[in-house]
Amino acid sequence: MSDNIIRSKSWNVKTLIIIGVFFTFHFSFFTSARGQASLGADTIALGDQTVLTVPVVDSLPRLLLPPQVVALEQNVDTATRSLLTTVTSFEPGEWVLHIGNDDSLLLVVTDVEVDTTTTEIRDIAPIQRIPYTFWEIFRWVLLALAVAAVAFGVWWVLTHRQKLQQVLGTAEPVDTRTPEERALQALETLRNSHLWQNGKVKEYHTELTDIVRRFIEEATGVRATEMTSDETVEALGGQWSAVSGQLKSIFATADLVKFAKSEPLPHEHEASLSRSVEFVKAMWQEVKPQKEPADEEAAKA
């Protein structure tokens, strides 16, 4: 009985020892697996790169890098269940990389040594201008020639527009009539329109005075279309005083109709048109000797 009890106690102790060794080994392996972080190279030159490898157990580990260390790229290797982070530094020194709360690695960054005895330190070279190639110059020459050709074409069309229209058959026929002929024909057209007979008294006298004003402007150069009646009569009173009296009578009747709403008698409408015809003929006889030399020179040109 006592032997059985001793054997039982001995078996229990062995079992506890085996279980304790198993858990101790498993815990140490699990702890080492969690903390197995490494650097591809723990010492690098200024600006070089190295890879920080951290195993992933349950979740991605938290990395805390000093401001002197820069993480360039980060990805997870599913084959080895590791977080790979490419790091570099541009400041020499010893920098501690913290992984999680308990683990850390030391990264040593060495400066680049420059032998000033054999290497001459110089300033930054100035900007150098690359000479233009033939095709680059030729391209600008072609562009300049094209712009000049377009400008010349626009100038030629504007200066020869009338001739060009005549060649193409789109030009309006040139009016070769004298100012007297144009005015007399316009007055005859007005007579045949029967405006005042149809009750359009104001339109009739307005058109009548417009014809006379255009004639004065074309024949003498006096800007009658931009003047009042009194200004027009005064402008013609000096050199052409002999015919200005007829003009004054024409304008007086028209102004009464247009501004005072006067109703002239039927014979007064015909009288105004007849006076206009007489004025145009008499005025042209005064102006014609001055116009003929200019017309001859224009015809020769």
Image (cartoon, rainbow, N blue to C red):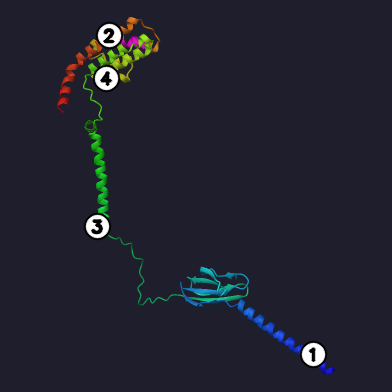
Above or below 195: residue 108? below
Q: Give the CA separation, mark 3 to mark 1.
A: 104 Å
**Sequence order check, earlier mark of 4 and 2:** 4
Q: Is residue 287 left or right of residue 46?
A: left
The residue at which mark 2 appears reads as 274
Instruction: Determine which quarter of the picture holds residue 206.
Output: top left
Q: Nearer the viewer, residue 168 or 153?
A: 168
The residue under label 3 is 134
Q: Nearer the viewer, residue 85 or 248?
A: 85
Residue 16, horizontal then vertical, whole percent: 74, 86
Pointer 4 residue: 217
Q: Secondary structure at mark 3?
A: helix
In the image, which residues are magenta? 250-255
Magenta stretch contains residue 57? no
Q: Quadrant of the C terminus?
A: top left
- Marks 4 and 2, how far apart at CA: 20 Å
Q: Amino acid at mark 4?
A: Glu
The residue tagged 1 is 9
